[in-house]
Image: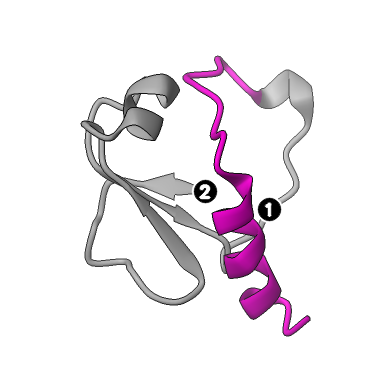
């Protein structure tokens, strides 16, 4: 999940600013937080559109390891 609610930050979340190189590459419209502690399975056919691709997955990997206690 990605949210624009920046107050939802913490060690299991990754903040991405829209003006950063990653934020611009993703096509973010606002500063956002990637939430790794609210996981869900979504069928591909339920995705309306892809707005971007997060290239710094090592940050998400660290947050996921904390979420999953790995």
Tag of residue 53: none
User: At x 62% / y 46%, what residue is drawn?
Assistant: 57
Give, as a single range, the part of the protein colored magenta. 47-70
* Identity of the residue furthest to the top in this view: 49
User: In the rendered view, does 39 fall on the left or right side of 29?
Assistant: right
Mark 2 crowdedness (10 Å alpha carbons): few <14, some 14-19, many ≥20 = few
Residue 16 point in image, percent of width and height: 34, 46
Measured Cα–Cα span from mark 2 to mark 1? 8 Å
User: At x 66% / y 59%, what residue is drawn?
Assistant: 61
User: At x 25% / y 25%, what residue is drawn?
Assistant: 29
Q: Which residue is tagged 2?
A: 1
Residue 51 point in image, percent of width and height: 47, 19
Residue 17 point in image, percent of width and height: 26, 42
User: In the rendered view, does 39 fall on the left or right side of 43?
Assistant: left
Based on the displayed image, in which of its 4 quarters is residue 60 positioned?
bottom right
User: At x 31% / y 45%, what residue is drawn?
Assistant: 32
Q: Is residue 56 magenta?
A: yes
Q: Is residue 43 magenta?
A: no
32 to 30, vertically: above or below: below
Answer with mark 2 or mark 1, whichever residue precedes in sequence. Answer: 2
Based on the displayed image, in which of its 4 quarters is residue 54 positioned?
top right
50 to 13, vertically: above or below: above
Q: Mark 2–mark 1 contact, CB under 8 Å?
A: yes
Question: For numbered disc 2, what is the local secondary structure?
Answer: loop
Q: Which residue is tagged 1?
A: 40
User: In the rendered view, does 54 fall on the left or right side of 10?
Assistant: right
32 to 68, vertically: above or below: above
Mark 1 crowdedness (10 Å alpha carbons): few <14, some 14-19, many ≥20 = few
Residue 70 point in image, percent of width and height: 78, 81
Question: For numbered disc 1, what is the local secondary structure?
Answer: loop
């Amino acid at each position: 999940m990605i949210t624009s609610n920046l107050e939802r930050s913490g060690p299991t979340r990754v903040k991405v600013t829209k003006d950063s190189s990653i934020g611009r590459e993703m096509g973010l419209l606002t500063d956002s937080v990637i939430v790794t502690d609210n996981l869900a399975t979504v069928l591909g056919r339920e995705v309306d559109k892809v707005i971007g691709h997060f290239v710094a997955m090592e940050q998400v990997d660290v947050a996921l390891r904390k979420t999953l206690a790995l």
